[in-house]
Image (cartoon, helix red, strand yellow):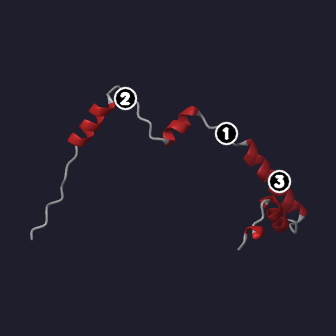
Amino acid sequence: MNSGDINPFPIDSYFSLLKNLSEDDKLELIALLSDSVQKRKKPTKRAIHSLFGALKTRQSADKFIFEIKKSRTFKRKPAKW
């Protein structure tokens, strides 16, 4: 496949697939697409922070890391050779 085979306009590809639908099916598709655009919400600041695993704590980063390392437990026993 060379770069000339890629369609830079996917809407044309979708239309070629959908142009043979009945008028009722096309109207239903238009309604579904319109609803999906209208229901789309703007991302909030809080939602973005949840993606990064933000943690609110008053501890310093060093103290927090120390406590995590201190609380680790290892249950694996070394192999006997």
Residue under pointer 2: 57
| 57 relative position to 79: left or right | right
Category of crowding for the residue at label 2, using alpha-carbon neighbours closer than 10 angstroms: few (below 14), some (14–19), many (at least 20): few
Category of crowding for the residue at label 1, using alpha-carbon neighbours closer than 10 angstroms: few (below 14), some (14–19), many (at least 20): few
Residue at 55%, 37% in the rendered image: 47
Q: Amino acid at mark 2?
A: Thr
Q: CA distance from mark 1 to mark 2?
A: 29 Å
The single residue placed furthest to the bottom in the displayed view is 1
Q: Is residue 73 above or below residue 50?
A: below
**Dot 2: element:** loop
60 or 58: which is nearer to us?
60
81 or 53: which is nearer to us?
81
Residue under pointer 1: 41
| 69 relative position to 29: left or right | left
Residue under pointer 3: 30
The single residue placed furthest to the right in the displayed view is 23
**Residue 80 placement (x, y as % from top left):** 9, 68
